[in-house]
Image (spheres, rainbow, N blue to C red):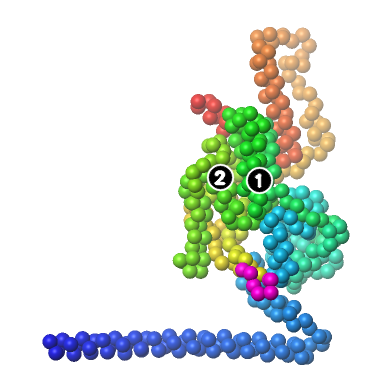
């Protein structure tokens, strides 16, 4: 017994010695890393004091520190940044759906400001600013070398004031100037209308109003059409939608899904990951859905698209989306400012990250430019047919109801042709819904 106890004690002592041998280098390594961090902080303090004491002009200490903080954050990725108190409040106002400015969502690429998308009904959209445009100058001042927040500050200004931005656009040889009058931006998150037998839900942003607006607009259009039986399907138009609130994207996707995962997020630590699932209930009652996207569809709009596509609940039409697959958390800081920090990546239900890749449509459809007047005039010339021949036989075999139905179908076809000239992608989406409805009717 004594031998066993001694052996056990010897084993325990050996274990302690072994642990000490392993832990010792780890503790030393951590201490060395901490010492390096403190040395770098001392270096920062030395540089800060030298600037205060020896820079050619007197500096604002607060602005200097904010610039250092922002430089640290923007070195991580284009979407992390420090928001001074004024910018933090402007961001909070924007999520409520009303703010002052030009009406563009921007990011930074190659040192210049890149337009993710113009917002519907804003001065930027009316001035013809497009997704993918680069803004190189503001009122003649170059944006090269500025942080994104500094560039945005230059574009802000009093409502009613004029700003001239210099734009570089793919396919245009020379940069050109665009004059815009700043205005108060009041976003209507969702605009609903009916085209033929399709309900079009144009979602321009994901703010606090989005999901309630969607529900109200959908119900109103269905009731106006005479009920769900009179509807072929729904178009979710997410083109040039720059994103917004994650929880609103989840709610919108949930509105059209009965079950299954909507999106998952994965942060630095595995335990910080979250998974969001759909709850029973489909606002569209199983009717076909077409989602429209383009290069200006980013972030939250990609979450909705990815969820509906992966669950085969919708056909995605248009061009490849922007590819912003990261989640930012806004953290309030002392003094009223805020830190916007990238804290996770999000994944579609199939487990795929779309970061820097975007979502590819099921059917790629480029937007066609409107036809010019001469082409349109040619198109409207009456076509030669049996009905145009002199002395033709009359068709007296149709009832008045049948004639009325034929006339209605002809009117719908003409309306589709007119829409195709104004918005080719939307017309294509509606044609898909019409075809799916015809197949379903034939099957019944």
Nearer-the-camera pick, 83 or 122:
83
Q: Which residues are magenta?
A: 331-337
Q: Residue at x 73, y 19 (%)?
A: 385
Which of the two labelled residues, at mark 2 and mark 1, occupies the earlier sequence position?
A: 1
Q: Is residue 96 above or below residue 361?
A: below
Q: Find disc 2 in the rendering and name its residue.
A: 255
For the N terminus, give its image quadrant: bottom left
Residue 37, percent across and down?
57, 85
Q: Residue at x 77, y 16 (%)?
A: 388
Q: Is residue 222 above or below residue 100?
A: above
Q: Is residue 132 above or below residue 222?
A: below
Q: Is residue 206 visible?
A: yes
Contact flag, marks 2 and 1 (Cβ < 8 Å):
no
Residue 342, percent across and down?
59, 67
Task: Describe the element under mark 1 as helix, strand or loop.
Answer: helix
The image quarter containing residue 220 is top right
Q: Is residue 27 left or right of residue 432?
A: left
Report crowding for label 1: few under 14, some 14 to 19, many 20 or more residues within 10 A (C-alpha). Answer: some
Q: Residue at x 70, y 88 (%)?
A: 47
Q: Is residue 273 left or right of residue 204?
A: left
Q: Residue at x 69, y 28 (%)?
A: 412
Q: Which mark is residue 402?
A: none
Q: Find disc 1 in the rendering and name its residue.
A: 213
Is residue 58 on the magenta stretch?
Answer: no
Is residue 335 on the magenta stretch?
Answer: yes
Report crowding for label 2: few under 14, some 14 to 19, many 20 or more residues within 10 A (C-alpha). Answer: some
Distance between mark 2 and mark 1 Cα atoms = 12 Å
The image quarter containing residue 221 is top right
**In the orientation shown, which residue stands out farthest toward the left?**
1
**In the orientation shown, which residue stands out farthest toward the front?**
335
Residue 329, percent across and down?
60, 65
Nearer-the-camera pick, 255 or 360:
255
């Amino acid at each position: 017994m004594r031998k066993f106890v001694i052996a056990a004690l010897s084993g325990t002592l050996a274990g302690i010695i072994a642990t000490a041998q392993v832990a010792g280098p780890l503790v030393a390594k951590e201490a060395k890393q901490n010492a390096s961090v403190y040395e770098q902080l001392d270096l920062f303090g030395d540089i800060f004091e030298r600037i205060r004491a020896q820079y050619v002009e007197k500096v604002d200490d607060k602005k200097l520190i904010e610039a250092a903080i922002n430089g640290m954050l923007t070195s991580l990725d284009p979407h992390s940044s420090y928001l001074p108190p004024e910018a933090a409040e402007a961001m909070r106002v924007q999520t409520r759906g009303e703010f002052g400015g030009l009406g563009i969502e921007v990011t930074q690429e190659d040192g210049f400001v890149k337009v993710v998308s113009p917002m519907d009904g804003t001065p930027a959209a009316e001035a013809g600013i497009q997704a993918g445009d680069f803004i190189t100058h503001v009122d003649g001042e170059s944006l090269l070398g500025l942080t994104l927040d500094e560039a945005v500050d230059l574009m802000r200004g009093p409502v009613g004031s004029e700003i001239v931005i210099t734009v570089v656009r793919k396919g245009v040889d020379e940069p050109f100037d665009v004059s815009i009058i700043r205005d108060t931006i009041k976003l209507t998150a969702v605009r609903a209308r009916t085209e033929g037998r399709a309900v079009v839900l144009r979602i321009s942003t994901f703010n606090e109003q989005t999901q309630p607006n969607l529900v109200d607009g959908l119900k109103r259009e269905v009731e106006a059409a005479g009920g769900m039986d009179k509807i072929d399907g729904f178009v979710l138009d997410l083109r040039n939608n720059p994103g917004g609130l994650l929880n609103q994207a989840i709610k919108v996707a949930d509105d059209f899904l009965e079950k299954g995962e909507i999106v998952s997020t994965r942060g630095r630590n595995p335990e910080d990951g979250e998974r969001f699932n759909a709850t029973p209930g489909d606002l569209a009652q199983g009717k076909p859905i077409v989602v429209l996207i383009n290069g200006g569809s980013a972030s939250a709009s990609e979450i909705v698209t990815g969820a509906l596509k992966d669950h085969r609940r919708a056909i995605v039409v248009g061009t490849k989306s922007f590819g912003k697959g990261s989640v930012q958390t806004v953290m309030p800081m002392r003094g009223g400012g805020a830190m916007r920090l990238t804290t996770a990546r999000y994944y579609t239900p199939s487990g795929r990250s779309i970061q820097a890749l975007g979502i590819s449509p099921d059917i790629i459809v480029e937007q066609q430019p409107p036809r010019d007047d001469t082409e349109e005039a040619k198109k409207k010339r009456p076509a030669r047919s049996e009905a145009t021949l002199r002395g033709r036989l009359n068709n007296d075999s149709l009832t008045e109801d049948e004639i009325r139905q034929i006339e209605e179908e002809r009117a719908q076809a003409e309306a589709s042709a007119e829409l195709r000239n104004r918005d080719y992608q939307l017309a294509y989406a509606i044609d898909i819904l019409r075809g799916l409805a015809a197949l379903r009717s034939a099957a019944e």
